[in-house]
């Protein structure tokens, strides 16, 4: 069978690799870190830096298609790989999502609603941004942020100086605080042939910027649900995207606001492992290898809970609970705020006794 190259060997790479092996593929992981979680379950691992051209060339020569589990792959790395092997999804998706400013401009140009936003570079331009956007607002680094890292809340304009100091000179944007009632996300896929399939939107609960829980179905009206799926389709088609994407949305009375897009499998899509015949990981592998997509139908309601840091103490009890499936990522050391695994609880169907 063919070999799939995966850039990044975290838990997403690990679950992609397992799904790929179920379809008869082998995976080759590339990650600068030693012993990445995906390494345990993959045929081959290369531990090398993102700027190691020799290692990158050997990696590209050993695989038939390259994908990735995180969006912050350096441009120079992509240049080396792209010359040797197809990367799916491609550059356009990375360009649209690596930088919060270009991401928001792309979404706005598509006619979608985003939070009000403005870039700034210094105290004067931040003051101007605050004047136009108002407070409360959030400063976010343009690049590399995840799990709410690189973000500072601004409650009043007086907080500006301290917030700017916190940004430590990183390029950033100011974003108006969206008074959402709740957050949802759509996990959608587009195949090599251009066909699109979406999963039911999930409702996401965050705690300190980290995803805590996702439940499906989300609390949405029928038209909101249709809007969510259609806008995800518009994003995928605009990028001629191939693979699975996560689209994070805020729900406000007027409709849906797009927060951010992730050009990869997404934490809020882990429920599909126990709620759908074809989960997001297999869906992504199918998309990038040119196989037909699963249709995304949900066969049960699910609540997915992330197991973060000391939540690991609850694993024995979770394993002993009916209708709960536990997935652990094999990370050796637990740390506060570190995602160690997740649990999918099946709800809303009669259980046999
Ligand atoms: P992820 O781990 O999802 O990539 P991230 O670090 O890229 O996270 P965001 O998704 O932008 O950060 O923000 C994290 C959370 O902070 C959001 O899910 C939401 O709860 C809150 N948040 C972010 N931006 C806004 C906003 N403009 N208005 C209100 N809440 C916001
Ligand atoms: Mg993000
Ligand atoms: Mg987010």
Image (spheres, rainbow, N blue to C red):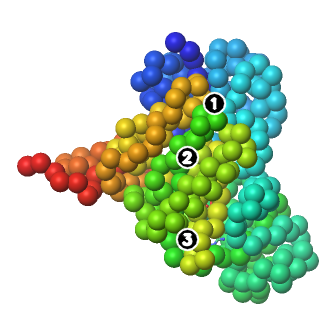
Q: Residues within 10 Å of mark 2 (few under 14, many from 20)?
A: many
Quarter where residue 349 is shown: bottom left
Q: Residues within 10 Å of mark 3 (few under 14, many from 20)?
A: many
Q: Residues within 10 Å of mark 1 (few under 14, many from 20)?
A: many
Where residue 17 appears, x then y in whole percent? Answer: 49, 28
Within 8 Å of ligand 1, the CB of disc 3? no
Most foreground residue, 198 or 308: 198
Relative placement, left or right, of 260 versus 159 is left
Q: Identify the residue position indicated by label 2 in the image.
A: 188
Between the C-alphas of marks 3 and 2, the distance is: 18 Å
Q: Secondary structure at mark 2?
A: strand
Q: Identify the residue position indicated by label 1 in the image.
A: 192
Between the C-alphas of marks 1 and 2, the distance is: 14 Å
Disc 3 and disc 1 in contact, CB within 8 angstroms: no
N-term-proximal mark, 3 vs 1:
1
Residue 348 in sight from this viewpoint: yes
Task: Look at the picture and state if 38 lies above or below 149.
Answer: above
Q: Which residue occupies 63% across, 67% down?
A: 257
Relative placement, left or right, of 209 versus 116 is left
Where residue 274 appears, x then y in whole percent? Answer: 34, 44
Where residue 264 appears, x then y in whole percent? Answer: 60, 42
Task: Look at the picture and state if 300 lies above or below 44.
Answer: below
Where residue 141 appears, x then y in whole percent? Answer: 74, 61
Q: Secondary structure at mark 1?
A: loop
Between the C-alphas of marks 3 and 1, the distance is: 31 Å
Q: Which residue occupies 50% across, 19% down?
A: 25
Relative placement, left or right, of 351 versus 244 is left
**What label does residue 4 carry, if any?**
none
Most foreground residue, 300 or 159: 300
């Amino acid at each position: 069978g063919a070999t799939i190259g995966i850039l990044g060997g975290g838990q997403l790479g690990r679950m992609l690799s397992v799904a790929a092996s179920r379809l008869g593929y082998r995976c080759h992981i590339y990650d600068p870190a030693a012993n990445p979680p995906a390494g345990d379950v993959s045929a081959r691992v290369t531990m090398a830096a993102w700027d190691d051209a020799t290692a990158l060339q050997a990696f590209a020569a050993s695989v038939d298609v390259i994908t990735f589990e995180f969006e912050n792959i350096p441009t120079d790395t992509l240049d080396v790989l792209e010359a040797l092997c197809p990367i799916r999804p491609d550059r356009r998706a990375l360009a649209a999502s690596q930088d919060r400013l270009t991401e928001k401009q792309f979404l706005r140009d598509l006619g979608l609603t985003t939070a009000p936003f403005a870039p700034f570079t210094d105290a004067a331009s931040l003051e101007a941004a605050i004047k136009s956007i108002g407070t409360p607002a959030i400063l976010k680094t343009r690049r590399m942020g995840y799990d709410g890292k690189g973000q500072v809340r601004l409650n009043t304009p007086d907080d500006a100086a301290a917030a700017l100091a916190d940004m430590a000179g990183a390029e950033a944007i100011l974003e108006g605080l969206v008074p959402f009632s709740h957050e949802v996300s759509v996990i959608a896929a587009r195949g090599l042939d251009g066909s699109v399939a979406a999963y039911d939107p999930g409702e996401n609960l965050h705690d300190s910027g980290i995803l805590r829980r996702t439940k499906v179905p989300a609390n949405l009206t029928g038209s909101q649900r249709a809007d969510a799926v259609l806008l995800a389709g518009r994003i995928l088609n605009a990028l001629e995207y191939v693979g699975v994407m996560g689209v994070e949305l805020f729900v406000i009375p007027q409709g849906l606001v797009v927060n951010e897009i992730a050009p990869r499998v997404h934490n809020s899509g882990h429920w599909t492992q126990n709620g759908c015949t074809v989960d997001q990981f297999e869906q992504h592998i199918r998309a990038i290898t040119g196989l037909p997509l699963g249709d995304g139908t949900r066969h049960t309601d699910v609540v997915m809970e992330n197991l973060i840091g000391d939540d690991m103490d609850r694993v024995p009890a979770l394993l002993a609970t009916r209708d709960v499936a536990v997935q652990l990522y094999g990370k050796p050391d637990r740390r506060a705020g570190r995602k160690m695994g997740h649990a999918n609880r099946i709800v809303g169907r009669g259980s046999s006794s």
